[in-house]
Image: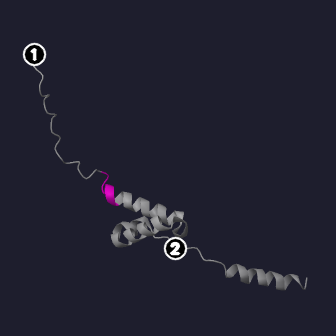
Amino acid sequence: MKRFVPLALATLILAACGEKPKLIETVESLVANPERLNALRVECKADHAQVGDAQCNAVAEATRRRFMDSGRPPYADAPVRPPAPPVGTSKD
């Protein structure tokens, strides 16, 4: 029992000194801050393992939301022109 208490204390101290989880920036904050989004995109591309899956997934989702904006493609209002008639066809 006398050896258990110091061993347990040492274990608790070592556990408290372990790595703290990284804070992950939210998708909404990245959408609102395009400079930070671009910086994180570069970091994810350079070293995905160090940045982490969760952060890189948030970066990908923020990029998708910024591109798609309101869910409509950027050229949704562009007029659609009818196809040109074929050239060189005649009925003889």
Task: Tell me if residue 69 is in the magenta stretch.
Answer: yes
Residue highlighted by disc 2:
23
Residue highlighted by disc 1:
91
What residue range appears in magenta? 66-71
**Quadrant (top left, top right, bottom left, bottom right) of the C terminus:** top left
Residue drawn at 58 percent across, 73 percent down? 21
Can you give x and y, in whole percent of width and height, for residue 29 in the image? 39, 70
The residue furthest top is 92
Q: Is residue 90 above or below residue 86?
A: above
Most foreground residue, 43 or 19: 43
**Quadrant (top left, top right, bottom left, bottom right) of the N terminus:** bottom right
Residue drawn at 53 percent across, 63 percent down? 53
Can you give x and y, in whole percent of width and height, for residue 42 in the image? 42, 68
Can you give x and y, in whole percent of width and height, for residue 89 in the image? 12, 22
Report the amino acid beneath label 1.
Answer: Lys
Q: Quadrant of residue 91?
A: top left
The residue furthest right is 1
